Image (cartoon, rainbow, N blue to C red):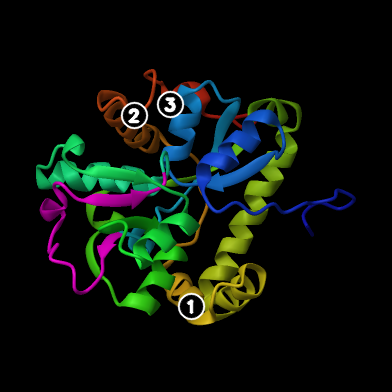
């Protein structure tokens, strides 16, 4: 808010990236942050979005896991199992990539597409065998179940998360995008040095228990930076993987949706 004198800032919470991308598409919000997969699904569906900047991966804060008593010991053991995951989310990409790495065809598991809240209920009642999700939902599950972690994004993927914008808004107000990215950069520096305060603030805003938010804050990587050719190539590899598996309706070219700041 301090970066925008005279401009009203409204914060809108989403539990996952796909509904955030849809809100960006229709102009209900102007900018937002998601994992790697939601903008790919959005771009394939023709969403009116652009990539404005990159942030670190969900890394250690996103995983595929099972309850301690589960017979599933590895990703390879997920063959024939029901795995809860949000369709089109970064955890969806983790599941696809982890199975690929383990030599298990994606069609040999049963993905159960659920929102984080619904997946939490399904995991609690053993309606799914495993769950792929990010923090703070992963951290909450850790505090409740002490689950067996089969794979983390940091071990399987070299990806980023993204700061996205509505394409028309970015074109009309490039200075707001630039100012926002700069302000987020300052916020990231502060957050990196004040993880306990980050956890407390998120606990107050979200209602997620402080112990879980503390776990999440302590393993989060903070930062915001320009989108490089290497980042575009990595995101393109993810998009190509989704298209090959038939998870998105048409192939996309990531570079077509990368926003360039005026003067760059």
- In-front residue for pair 66/220: 66
The residue positioned 72% from the left and 54% from the top of the image is 11
Secondary structure beneath disc 1? helix
Where residue 116 appears, as percent x and y from the top left, is: 46, 56
- In-front residue for pair 92/159: 92
Q: Is residue 168 left or right of residue 87?
A: right
- Any part of residue 135 in sight: no
Q: Nearer the viewer, mark 1 or mark 3?
A: 1
The residue positioned 64% from the left and 27% from the top of the image is 167
Q: Nearer the viewer, mark 3 or mark 2?
A: 2
Is residue 83 found inside the magenta-colored segment of the image? Answer: yes
Q: Nearer the viewer, mark 2 or mark 1?
A: 2
Q: CA distance from mark 3 to mark 2?
A: 16 Å
Q: CA distance from mark 1 to mark 3?
A: 34 Å
The residue positioned 52% from the left and 29% from the top of the image is 258
Marking on residue 244: none
**Which residue corresponds to mark 3?**
254
Based on the displayed image, in which of its 4 quarters is residue 169 positioned? top right
Q: What span is colored magenta in the figure?
A: 64-86
The residue positioned 27% from the left and 72% from the top of the image is 147
Secondary structure beneath disc 2? loop
Above or below: residue 60 compared with residue 25:
below
Above or below: residue 137 compared with residue 174:
below
Where residue 221 appears, as percent x and y from the top left, is: 44, 63
Marking on residue 247: 2
Marking on residue 214: 1
- Any part of residue 37 in sight: yes
- In-front residue for pair 147/82: 82
């Amino acid at each position: 808010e301090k970066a925008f004198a005279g401009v009203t800032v409204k914060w809108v919470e989403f539990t996952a990236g796909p509904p955030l991308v849809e809100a960006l598409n229709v102009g209900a919000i102007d900018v937002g942050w998601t994992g790697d997969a939601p903008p790919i699904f959005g771009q394939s569906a023709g969403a009116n979005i652009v990539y404005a900047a990159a942030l670190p991966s969900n890394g250690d804060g996103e995983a595929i896991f099972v309850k301690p008593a589960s017979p599933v010991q590895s990703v390879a053991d997920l063959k024939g199992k029901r795995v809860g995951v949000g369709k089109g989310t970064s955890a969806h990409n983790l599941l696809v990539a982890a199975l690929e790495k383990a030599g298990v065809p994606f069609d040999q598991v049963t993905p159960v597409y659920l929102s984080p809240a619904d997946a939490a209920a399904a995991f609690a009642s053993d309606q799914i065998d495993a769950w792929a999700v990010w923090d703070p939902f992963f951290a909450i599950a850790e505090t409740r179940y002490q689950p067996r972690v089969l794979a983390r994004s940091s071990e399987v993927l070299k990806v980023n998360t993204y700061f996205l914008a509505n394409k028309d808004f970015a074109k009309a107000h490039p200075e707001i995008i630039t100012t926002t990215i700069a302000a987020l950069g300052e916020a990231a520096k502060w957050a990196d040095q004040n993880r306990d305060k980050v956890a407390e603030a998120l606990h107050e805003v979200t209602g997620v228990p402080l112990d879980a938010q503390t776990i999440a804050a302590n393993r989060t990587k903070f930062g915001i930076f320009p989108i490089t050719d290497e980042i575009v190539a990595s995101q393109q590899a993810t998009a190509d993987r989704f298209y090959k598996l038939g998870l998105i309706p048409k192939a996309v070219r990531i570079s077509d949706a990368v926003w360039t700041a005026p003067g760059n």
